[in-house]
Amino acid sequence: MKIALLIITLLLPFNSLDEEARRWGQIGHRTTGHIATQLLTDNAAEEVHRVLNGNSLAEVSTWMDEVRSDRSFRYMSPWHYCTIPEGKTYEEAGTPEEGDIIWAIDKMVTELKSGELSAEQEAINLKVLVHLVGDLHQPLHVGNGTDRGGNDVRVQWFGGNSNLHRVWDSEMIDGKQLSFTELADFIDDQLNEETINEWQSTTVLDWAYESQELLDQVYEYPENGRLGYEYSFLNFDTVEKRLLQAGVRLAGLINEIYAN
Ligand code: ADE
Ligand code: ZN
Ligand code: ZN
């Protein structure tokens, strides 16, 4: 009996860690931060260095997941995602009272542009911004309201228990066994000036709809729920494109915030 209790106690935190803490995994977030860093203007790069006390965008990109266990930051939990039911627009769905990812990105940008934040708050806003632009490009962070963005969709990943959300946050990316700098270098060779301008001329809401439009592809997996090489082969180009778009757009926002 005592042993059973001990085992349950030991396993509980791991379960909630699996479900909640990993989000767009660490490598995905850092990759996006690293790509953005390479596209900053000189002035923006200087300001980022100042605001983050010398830390990089890649380093701070996972801060929002790291503070999830801290009660004083619990109000940020609903900011990692949004819900747009199938066939509805975001306006029709409405912004929840506690905020969501689209609302939070707008809030961070507006406050950063105001230039009126304390040094501490400016750093927090920037860390939140880096993280959320990444999250919004993970298709399942725009949920359809039926399965908590795929967290409730149990699947097997190479024979181990997982869920669809986690496959997109981290399993496919971690499976490549690359560091974030290696992954960023592999990805950004597709980039040219025209693509950068095109991607940076879109709105936060556009990014959400792009994610929503990818969901048909995301949910197309074998009926037995066994995911592995084939699912990764069919979807990794999309993962790479979303990481790249997130990095390019994050740089666009930060360059705009620190334009003068
Ligand atoms: N909880 C509810 N919907 C979610 C989503 N789309 N992503 C992450 N967590 C969620
Ligand atoms: Zn996630
Ligand atoms: Zn997140």
Image: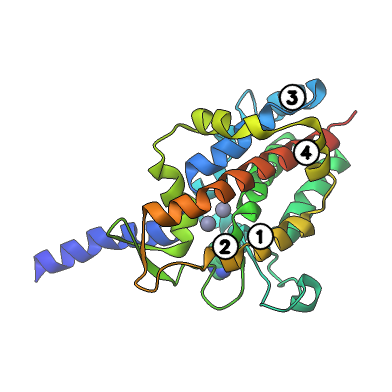
Residue that carries the numbered disc 3 in the rendered image: 45
Residue that carries the numbered disc 4 in the rendered image: 195
Q: Which of 210 and 8 lies nearest the eye of the viewer? A: 210
Q: For the residue marked with disc 2, what is the amino acid?
A: Leu
Decide if residue 8 is on the left or right side of residue 158.
left
Q: What residue sits 64% from the left and 25% below the top?
A: 53
Residue 124 visible in the picture: no
Q: Which of 99 and 197 lies nearest the eye of the viewer? A: 197
| Residue 16 screen position, x and y as percent | 38, 62
Distance Cα–Cα, label 1 vs label 3: 28 Å
Distance Cα–Cα, label 4 vs label 3: 21 Å
Q: For the residue marked with disc 1, what is the amino acid?
A: Ser
Mark 2 burial class by Cα count in 10 Å: few <14, some 14-19, many 20+ = many
Mark 3 burial class by Cα count in 10 Å: few <14, some 14-19, many 20+ = many
Which label's residue is closer to the chain start, 2 or 1?
A: 2
Mark 4 burial class by Cα count in 10 Å: few <14, some 14-19, many 20+ = few
Which label's residue is closer to the chain start, 4 or 3?
A: 3
**Against 44, is 31 above or below?**
below
The residue carrying mark 1 has its beta carbon less than 8 Å from ligand 1: no
Instruction: Determine which of the numbered discs, if any, sits on residue 140 in the image.
Output: 2
Instruction: Determine which of the numbered discs, if any, sits on residue 211 in the image.
Output: 1
**Against 204, is 155 above or below?**
below
Q: Decide: marks 1, 3 in contact (CB < 8 A)?
A: no
Q: What residue sits 74% from the left and 42% below the top?
A: 249
**Against 186, is 54 above or below?**
above
Q: For the residue marked with disc 4, what is the amino acid?
A: Thr
In which quarter of the view is residue 59 placed?
top right
Distance Cα–Cα, label 1 vs label 4: 18 Å
Decide if residue 59 is on the left or right side of residue 248.
left
Q: Secondary structure at mark 2?
A: helix
